[in-house]
Image (cartoon, coloured by chain):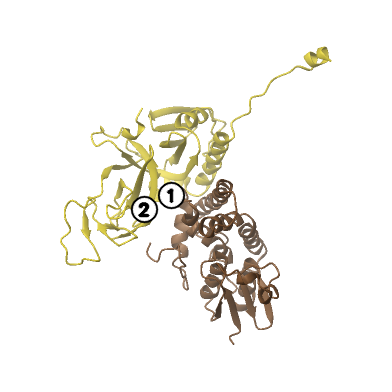
Chain colours: A yellow, B brown
């Protein structure tokens, strides 16, 4: 399965502040995620056409991102608009960075490597989201999902011990519910052997900011621990069997 | 001779920590350049007399000759910062700054070794050093994620301390030893904030533009 052609989250929205950039990967493809001064997020190939420098090392000025090497500036369409060493040059239209479809939904920045991908099937949030954390682990998305599905979640909001329900909203988004609380977990296939989990709370900031975030951060760190420390296979040997051998 | 003299190597991140401390505390100091690479001047008798461990940085403050990065930062904050904000006096804040200085000296040593290996061909197991470095940086990122939920911008308390100064270079220079900033969003946020502190300066490997 070429997972890069599916819509996948590549960052928490919260992690890409206005006028900043960061690198990431989707199915091994290097990407830059950046947010322009008007607050719109962009996902591009992470490579300046000039010298191949990673644009994620660059800097955002207004609605342009500039390469750290020689300051070539690209507009929000990926088109190079300005080359500082040749200030009077009308930049050829062929100097353009490949851009990918980008959406922000469920408190995450989503993209797909396919130009003709269908619409992103993440329902619009009625209550908003509150960020928790992105977890990065050395294993496949399938292995991550297997551990995720074995988790229980203690609710933050008042209530007795609630049952945990886990369901797939789409192949890259899982919902984990307990009592009145609901987490959304976006799964990013960085490579076949590295996966990111982007964890947000589905709910109102006034309810969850602070204490709720800390509560679910503990859960997220527990999830990461379980993914990184799978239970060792044990061999049950009864004391009677041992006694018989002896 | 100025009261404060720093024996300095420009490419050494530990010297950079002291330069940051001196600058952010608004102090004036004299710099004496030391030929660390390739000269290993810090291991010659004149330097061993000041620091038998054969390492920089070394700070001279009048008659006091001090080595050990975190000790130097603590000394500067204790004796040259009238505001007291860089090394808080109060119990818990003081203890937590010490905890992170200890983390800087012990856990981030892997990042120094990884960078020395990468830049100056110092001996070391690259894979192991990189793994230990990534682990230490993740401890920092987890901490700053939790701090963010408390509405806090700094490692300890409500303002920047020498803990932030001691911890900044390992993250800012991590690309020198093959670790990108991509997977440490809370440290990216903290580093951007750190760069706005009055007296901030870069060193080779840390871009002026960001």
Above or below B172: residue B47: below
Q: Position of residue A220 (x, y in %)?
A: 52, 40
Q: Give the number of callouts.
A: 2
Is residue B209 among the parts visible in the rendering?
A: yes
Task: Find residue A69 and report its image quarter.
Answer: bottom left
| Badge 2: chain ID | A
**Which quarter of the image is occupied by the C terminus of chain B?**
bottom left
Question: Does B26 appear above or below A54?
Answer: below
Q: Residue furthest front?
A: B39
The answer to whether residue B82 shows anywhere in this view is no
- Crowdedness near tag 2: few (<14), some (14–19) or many (≥20) residues, C-alpha within 10 Å: many
Circle 1 is placed at which residue position?
B182
Q: Which residue is the extreme one toward the bottom? A: B1
| Residue B168: image tag | none
- The answer as to whether the residues below labels 2 and 1 share one chain is no
Residue in the picture at 48% in, 57% down: B176
Residue tagged 2:
A56
Mark 1 surroundings within 10 Å by alpha-carbon count, few (fewer than 14), some (14 through 19), many (20 or more):
some
The extreme top residue here reads: A244
User: What kind of element bears circle 1?
Assistant: loop
Give percent across and percent down for residue A90. Answer: 15, 61
Instruction: Check whether the beta carbons of the residues at disc 2 and disc 1 lie within 8 A of each other.
Output: yes
Instruction: Return the x and y of residue A3 as percentages of the image width and height.
Output: 36, 32
Chain letter of mark 1 equals: B
Q: Position of residue A230 (x, y in %)?
A: 59, 31
Q: Is residue B144 left or right of residue A53?
A: right
**Quadrant, the N terminus of chain B:** bottom right
The quadrant where residue B69 appears: bottom right
SS label for mark 2 = helix
User: What is the spatial separation of the Cα atoms under label 2 and label 1, in whole angstroms?
Assistant: 9 Å
Q: Nearer the viewer, residue A90 or A6?
A: A90
Q: Nearer the viewer, residue A34 or A169?
A: A34
């Amino acid at each position: 399965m070429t997972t890069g052609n599916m819509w996948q989250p590549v960052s928490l929205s919260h992690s890409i502040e206005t006028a900043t950039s960061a690198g990431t990967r989707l199915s091994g493809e290097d990407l830059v995620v950046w947010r322009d001064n008007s607050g719109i997020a962009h996902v591009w190939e992470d490579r300046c056409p000039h010298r191949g420098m990673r644009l994620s090392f660059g800097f955002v000025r207004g609605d342009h991102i500039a390469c750290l090497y020689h300051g070539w500036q690209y507009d929000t369409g990926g088109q190079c608009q300005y080359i500082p060493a040749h200030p009077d040059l009308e930049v050829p239209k062929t100097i353009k960075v490949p851009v990918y479809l980008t959406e922000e939904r469920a408190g995450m920045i989503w993209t797909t490597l396919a130009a003709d991908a269908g619409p992103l099937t993440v329902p619009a949030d009625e209550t908003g989201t509150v960020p928790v954390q992105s977890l990065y682990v050395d294993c496949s998305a399938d292995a991550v999902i297997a551990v995720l599905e074995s988790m229980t979640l203690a609710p933050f909001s008042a209530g007795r011990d609630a049952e945990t329900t886990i369901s797939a909203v789409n192949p890259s988004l899982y919902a984990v519910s307990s009592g009145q609380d609901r987490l959304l977990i976006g799964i990013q296939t960085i490579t076949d052997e590295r996966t990111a989990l982007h964890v947000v709370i589905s709910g109102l900031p006034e309810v969850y900011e602070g204490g709720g975030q800390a509560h679910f951060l503990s859960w997220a760190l527990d999830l990461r621990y379980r993914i990184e420390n799978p239970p060792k296979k044990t061999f049950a040997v009864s004391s009677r069997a041992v006694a018989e051998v002896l | 001779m100025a009261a404060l003299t720093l024996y300095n190597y420009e490419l050494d991140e530990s010297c950079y920590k002291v330069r940051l401390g001196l600058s952010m505390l608004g102090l004036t100091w004299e710099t004496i350049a030391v030929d660390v690479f390739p000269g290993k001047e810090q291991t010659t008798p004149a330097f061993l007399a000041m620091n038998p461990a054969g390492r920089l940085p070394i700070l001279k403050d009048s008659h006091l000759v001090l080595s050990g990065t975190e000790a130097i930062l603590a000394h500067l904050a204790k004796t040259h910062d009238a505001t007291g904000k860089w090394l808080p006096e109060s119990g818990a804040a003081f203890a937590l700054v010490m905890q992170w200085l200890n983390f800087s000296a012990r856990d981030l040593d892997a990042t120094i070794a990884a960078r020395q290996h990468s830049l100056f061909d110092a001996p070391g197991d690259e894979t192991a050093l990189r793994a230990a470095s990534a682990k230490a940086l993740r401890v920092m990122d987890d901490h700053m994620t939790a701090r963010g939920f408390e509405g806090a911008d700094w490692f300890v308390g409500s303002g920047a301390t020498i803990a932030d100064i001691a911890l900044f270079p390992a993250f800012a220079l991590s690309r020198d030893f093959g670790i990108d900033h991509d997977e440490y969003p809370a440290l990216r946020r903290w580093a951007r904030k750190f760069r706005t502190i009055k007296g901030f300066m870069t060193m080779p490997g840390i871009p002026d533009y960001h």
